[in-house]
Image: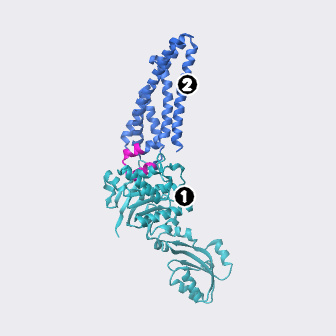
Amino acid sequence: MNKWDTLTPVLIQSIGETVYMVAVSLLISGVAGLVIGALLYATRPGNLFENRVVFAVANLVINLIRPIPFIIFLTVVIARVVEQNLVAVDPGTVEAARAVGARRIGVLFGVVIPEALAPLILGYTFMFIAVVDMSAMAGYIGGGGLGNFAIIYGYQQFNQQATWVTVAIIVVIVQAGQLIGNALAHRILRR
Amino acid sequence: MTAVIELRGVTKSFRTDRRTSTTAVDDVSLTVEEGSIVGVIGYSGAGKSTLVRLLNGLEQPTSGTVEVLGVNVGDATEAKLRDLRRRVGMIFQQFNLFTSRTVAANVAYPLKVAGWKKADRDKRVAELLDFVGIGDKAKQYPRRLSGGQKQRVGIARAIATDPRILLADEATSALDPQTTAEVLDLLREINRRLGITIVVITHQISIVHELCDQVIVMDGGRVVDSGDTYRVFAHPRAELTKRFVAAVTQGVPSGEALAALAAGGGELLSVEVNEFSSEDVSNVFHRHGVRHSVVYGGVTDVLGRQLGTLTYRVHADDLDTVVAELRAHTDVVLPAQEVRS
């Protein structure tokens, strides 16, 4: 059992690395994805900033970038998730906001995004879990974090216990994320 | 009287795909006077919704000029249009409330957009919610409200910036009759107390009868009848107007209904009731000592005046004289005689 004396600090550091990886990638691609997704939504034919050229170009670029992994990939997937949730917002609320004289950009950020908040949170929760999974894969190819810990101290040193502990921690992180996401979304939906 | 809305030769077409387009509004010219309540009636697809969206610049005319409160909607800048929209409120069939905002925040939204300070907004919102009768719902979210309450929020939001015109797009079509009556009362009060001109889009003739002093009948994007509500319905020019009236008043009996009535004896007399009321008809009968009873038909109330067709069973010796006297005032049909001949 005393090998956990040396493993525990490494494990804690690995958790930190995973959390860091997930947080940074989600933050960067979450914001970028929101902007690109909003752009896609707004420039769609018939929408606030209808612009066939911008929409077609953004759409094409996204489809081209999609095969590139991780941070950029993530941005693009989040952009699609955001776009889909914004498209589902009742166009009537957009019309109502425009009818009282609101600026189009004000309608986009003041009405469309708040109206889509609950599904957006669920979408981001889904992406959070995907990123935790991805970070474990990143660990396998040398990216550090819990994935790396499981490989080096568990799999390669025949320490089953270390492997299972790592898996359990990942499951806990995923569950916690899902619970928080669901709770937030439901709080908004129940209003 | 000043015109607050003036349309001249307005056409609006939409491209449906690369080659074809549809014309939603076709060469429409009309004037709306300040302080009036105007009904735009027609079946769905008649271009009513497009017409009303031309009035606040949510749609731009393909040709012709749309002038609202002195602003030419066709060539106004975006900033000018936003300014116009603060002076033209709009309510919707599905209410279109912001589900992410409380009732108070929904009503405050136009004020925020117009740059009101928080303290002024709060005061105005409280006033508005009291005016529409839901002062106790300020902190609720729209999801929790009934249809009638939602439309009250929609109305409060629409009149928040004290507009001169209110556009109502099928505003009562999603409501039950009782709630519809309440909303119509509220609209009437807004018109009378605040002097706001109201343009009502509807497919329900009863709304026009109860609320509107002017009516515009639309069919296939065109205006087929328009003018003073009573005159338009008492003397319809277009087929569609006649159908709208017949739907409410039953008209002249025919087919099985007529056969059954004709078997009852006497002579059947269908009299159109308009400025010449049912009391006037009875007076003629009394003068000639004609025994009579109403056996078919209906009368509707248009802003307090009668309109409809009544069919009487009469027993008269000098029927021709009676009919001639009635015909001096209104249209009379003898449906049973027409079938016999």
Foreground pick, B199 / B203: B199
Chain coloured blue here: A
- Say whether residue B160 is left or right of residue B75: right
Residue type beneath disc 1: Leu
Q: Secondary structure at mark 1?
A: loop
Question: As drawn, is B265 to the left or to the right of B146?
Answer: right
Nearer to us in this view, B207 or A158? A158
Query: Is B71 within the magenta?
Result: no
Instruction: Give the residue at mark 1.
Output: B175
Do the residues marked 2 and 1 share a common chain? no
Residue A54 vertical position relative to residue B209 in the rendered view, above or below: above
Residue B22 seen in this snapshot: no
Query: What colour has chain B?
Result: cyan
Asked if A61 appears above or below B91 in the picture, the reply is above
Residue placed under numbered mark 2 in the picture: A171
Q: Is residue B22 above or below residue A45?
A: below
Q: Give the magenta range.
A: A93-110
- Calculate the distance from the C-alpha at mark 2 to the C-alpha at mark 1: 50 Å
Q: Residue at the location (46% across, 47% down)?
A: B101
